[in-house]
């Protein structure tokens, strides 16, 4: 049952990414390019739409004991703002700006684009592996 | 500024679909829809929830493919500079794992519950991305 929910949610998420055209890194970079003279506001509308639904969803969650098919709602993260969060977010932002792909759109575009998309996804996995390896070494 | 009404409407509708997906995952399964977390855990995490993470990824990759089959392939405007693509991918993969989230986990799910960590992370990666694009324009790479 939970795998089926995951499949459907992943599919719906992918549908949202292709309908909104966030699978096109050029469009994402056109949003980030605030001084280029051809600023594209689309990503802002995508975020606004997604946040509007999720704000309501958190309200609904707050009024319920538990999710329909799970034991509990995810708790607020216990860690505060730390070096890992700051360094991670800045590294991610630089990579996102360089190419225009964040993880979701890169995966959604995997069958739509050329070899560059596959190379990006492979490099992303290498980056994740580097993090896993570094954490194992440092504890 | 380029304001194309069809583009922003598609953006809004797509955003509502993304928000609905994240809302369903939260309310049905009690999970945060964070793509970097789901991808990283599927490949490098514990075996816990492996089947669910894999199913999510299958949906995420397959539905755009199925959508594009009748609708035609969208333009994927990615740089053909392979070293740049590799650098970008590694930074995105490493950074999202270190910072515990990306545009979906921090940007959509965390921001909407006003998590301090997610507000800070989203602010930082947005500013870092804007500055990166600005510097690339300045020095003429991309």
Image (spheres, coloured by chain):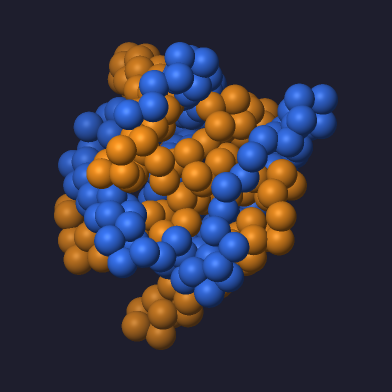
Chain colours: A orange, B blue
Residue at the image position 45 percent from the left and 19 percent from the top: B4
Residue B8 visible, this orientation = yes
Quadrant of residue A48 within the rendered picture: top left
Relative vertical location of residue A50 with respect to residue B135 in this rendering, above or below: above
Residue at image position (18%, 61%) is A82
Residue A119 located left or right of residue B13: right
**What residue is shown at x 33% (from left), y 57% (from top)?**
B137
User: Image quadrant for the C terminus of chain A?
Assistant: bottom left
Instruction: Note whether B54 is above or below A63 in the view shown.
Output: below
Residue B3 spot, x, y in % from top left: 39, 21
Q: Position of residue B20 (x, y in %)?
A: 50, 20
Tell me where residue A57 sits by quadrant: top left
Nearest to the observer: residue A34 or residue B91: A34
Q: Can residue A108 be seen in this view?
A: no
- x, y percent for residue A3: 69, 37
Residue A12 placement, left or right of A100 = right
Q: Where is residue A90 in the image (x, y as percent from the top left)?
A: 28, 60
Q: Which of A17 and B72 is in front in this view?
A: B72
Q: Is residue B51 left or right of residue B40?
A: right
Based on the displayed image, in which of its 4 quarters is residue A6 positioned? top right
- Specify the quadrant that holds the N terminus of chain A: top right
Q: Which of A70 and B50 is in front in this view?
A: B50
Q: Nearer the viewer, residue B127 or A13?
A: B127
């Amino acid at each position: 049952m939970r795998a089926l929910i995951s499949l459907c949610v992943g599919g719906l998420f992918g549908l949202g990414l292709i309908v909104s055209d966030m699978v096109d890194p050029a469009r994402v970079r056109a949003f980030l390019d605030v001084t280029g003279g051809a600023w594209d506001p689309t990503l802002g509308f995508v975020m606004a739409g997604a946040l509007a639904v999720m704000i309501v969803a958190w309200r609904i969650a707050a009024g319920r004991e538990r999710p329909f098919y799970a034991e509990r709602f995810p708790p607020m993260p216990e860690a505060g703002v730390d070096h890992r969060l700051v360094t991670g977010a800045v590294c991610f932002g630089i990579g996102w700006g360089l190419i225009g792909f964040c993880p979701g759109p890169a995966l959604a575009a995997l069958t739509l684009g050329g070899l560059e998309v596959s190379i990006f996804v492979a490099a992303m996995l290498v980056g994740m592996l580097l993090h896993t390896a570094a954490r194992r070494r440092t504890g | 500024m380029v304001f194309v009404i069809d583009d922003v409407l598609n953006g809004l509708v797509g955003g509502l679909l993304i928000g609905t997906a994240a809302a369903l995952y939260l309310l049905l399964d009690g999970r945060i829809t964070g793509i970097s977390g789901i991808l990283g855990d599927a490949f490098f995490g514990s075996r816990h929830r492996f089947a669910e993470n894999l199913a999510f990824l299958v949906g995420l990759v397959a539905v755009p493919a199925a959508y594009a089959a009748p609708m035609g392939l969208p333009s994927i405007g990615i740089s053909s500079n392979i070293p740049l693509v590799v650098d970008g991918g590694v930074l995105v993969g490493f950074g999202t794992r270190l910072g515990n989230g990306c545009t979906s986990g921090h940007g959509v799910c965390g921001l909407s519950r006003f998590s301090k960590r997610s507000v800070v992370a989203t602010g930082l990666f947005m500013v870092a991305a804007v500055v990166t694009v600005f510097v690339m324009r300045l020095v003429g790479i991309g």
